[in-house]
Image: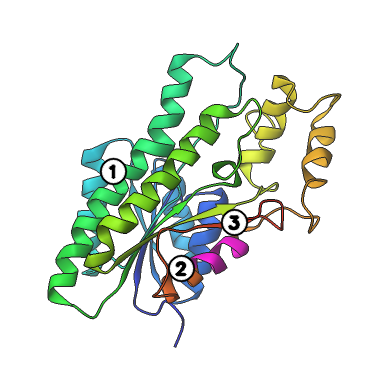
């Protein structure tokens, strides 16, 4: 029996990057995976590769989030795990950050998690009434930047700090309904498009923002961040998937923010 056999798992932002890697790992554990993403064409391609189902969603639009949950229930008859992974990062210091950019990051990383948790929890509560023995999970893919402030990256870090506040609050509210709520705080996925995209990746953004003193090239920025990890490598999707499996299997843990950072961030 695989560890997620017959469970239905929604992963937002799953068409590429961390989300796609997470979806693939969970599918291998027997889950019915819903690949939910704004980029529907890419989501379809990703879903086909892992035997999942693709659903278009803008996580900042409440009607679309509600529809995602409803369509998942219609197709599979259950929703066991909702993973809020979709996110956005826009680096910049106080002098250059615009209100429009700040509000966009907040809307995608913070407000959208509220919308996902709200509608996922409603479906899980209905299932709990019919199946009292079931336990459900809402998991936010947060960041190590949700555990420690980030220089010239305050919009992202602030939204992730706020996400942990939501996780802890939702955990207390939903525990009586058999719903666990946790956050996973990954380290840097250097190989993913978030970091390595040659035009919009973080290596390029941080170089242009002057976040790494003395850096002249993207390679200089990458070496700087690799040197910060005690285990001398970046985080990969399998590392995060293992933390997700821990959250799902551990029935006595809720409201936690679990670092998966190779020792770079440690809980105090």
**Could you say whether the residue bearing mark 1 is in a helix, strand or loop?**
helix
**Could you say whether the residue bearing mark 2 is in a helix, strand or loop?**
helix
Q: Residues within 10 Å of mark 1 (few under 14, many from 20)?
A: many
Q: Is residue 19 left or right of residue 5?
A: right
Q: Is residue 168 left or right of residue 46?
A: left
Q: Is residue 105 left or right of residue 97?
A: left
Identify the image quadrant of the C terminus: bottom right
- Which residue is rendered at x = 23% and y = 81% of the image? 133
Q: Which dot, 1 or 3, sits closer to the camera?
A: 3
Disc marking residue 247: 2
The residue indicated by pointer 1 is 115
| Alpha carbon separation for disc pair 1 and 3 | 24 Å
Instruction: Find the residue positioned furthest to the bottom.
Output: 1
Mark nearer the N terminus (2 vs 3): 2
- Estimate the x, y position of residue 123 in percent, counting from the top left: 20, 60
| Alpha carbon separation for disc pair 2 and 1 | 21 Å
Q: Is residue 119 above or below residue 213?
A: below
- Which residue is rendered at x = 64% and y = 50% of the image? 187
Q: Was residue 243 drawn as part of the magenta stretch in this picture? A: yes
Disc marking residue 189: none
- Which residue is rendered at x = 59% and y = 41% of the image? 145
Q: Was residue 253 drawn as part of the magenta stretch in this picture? A: no
- Give whichever of 89, 25 is nearer the camera: 89
- Estimate the x, y position of residue 139 in percent, counting from the top left: 41, 57
- Estimate the x, y position of residue 135 in percent, counting from the top left: 30, 73
Identify the image quadrant of the N terminus: bottom left
Quadrant of residue 86 in the image?
A: top left
- Give whichever of 246, 197 is nearer the camera: 246
**Could you say whether the residue bearing mark 3 is in a helix, strand or loop?**
strand
- Tell me the magenta residue range: 238-244
The residue indicated by pointer 3 is 259
């Amino acid at each position: 029996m695989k560890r997620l056999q017959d469970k239905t798992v929604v992963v937002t932002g799953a068409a590429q990057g961390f989300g796609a890697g997470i979806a693939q790992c969970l599918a291998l554990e027997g889950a019915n995976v819903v690949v939910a993403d704004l980029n529907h064409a890419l989501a379809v391609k990703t879903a086909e590769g892992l035997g999942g189902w693709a659903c278009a969603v803008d996580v900042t639009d409440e009607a679309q989030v509600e529809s995602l949950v409803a369509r998942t229930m219609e197709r599979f008859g259950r929703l066991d795990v909702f993973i809020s992974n979709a996110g956005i990062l826009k680096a910049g210091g106080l002098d250059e950050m615009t209100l429009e950019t700040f509000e966009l990051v907040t809307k995608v990383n913070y407000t959208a998690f509220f919308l996902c948790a709200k509608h996922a929890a409603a479906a899980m509560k209905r299932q709990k009434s019919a199946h009292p023995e079931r336990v459900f999970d809402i998991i936010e893919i947060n960041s190590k930047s949700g555990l420690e402030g980030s220089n010239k990256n305050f919009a992202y870090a602030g939204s992730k700090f706020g996400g942990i506040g939501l996780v802890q609050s939702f955990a207390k509210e939903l525990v009586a309904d058999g719903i666990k709520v946790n956050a996973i705080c990954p380290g840097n996925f250097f190989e993913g498009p978030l970091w390595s995209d040659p035009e919009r990746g973080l290596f390029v953004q941080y170089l242009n923002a002057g976040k790494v003193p003395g850096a002249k090239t993207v390679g200089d920025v990458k070496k700087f961040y690799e040197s910060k990890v005690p285990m001398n490598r970046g985080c990969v999707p399998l590392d995060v998937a293992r933390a997700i499996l821990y959250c799902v299997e551990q029935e006595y843990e809720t409201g936690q923010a679990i670092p998966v950072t190779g020792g770079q961030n440690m809980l105090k």
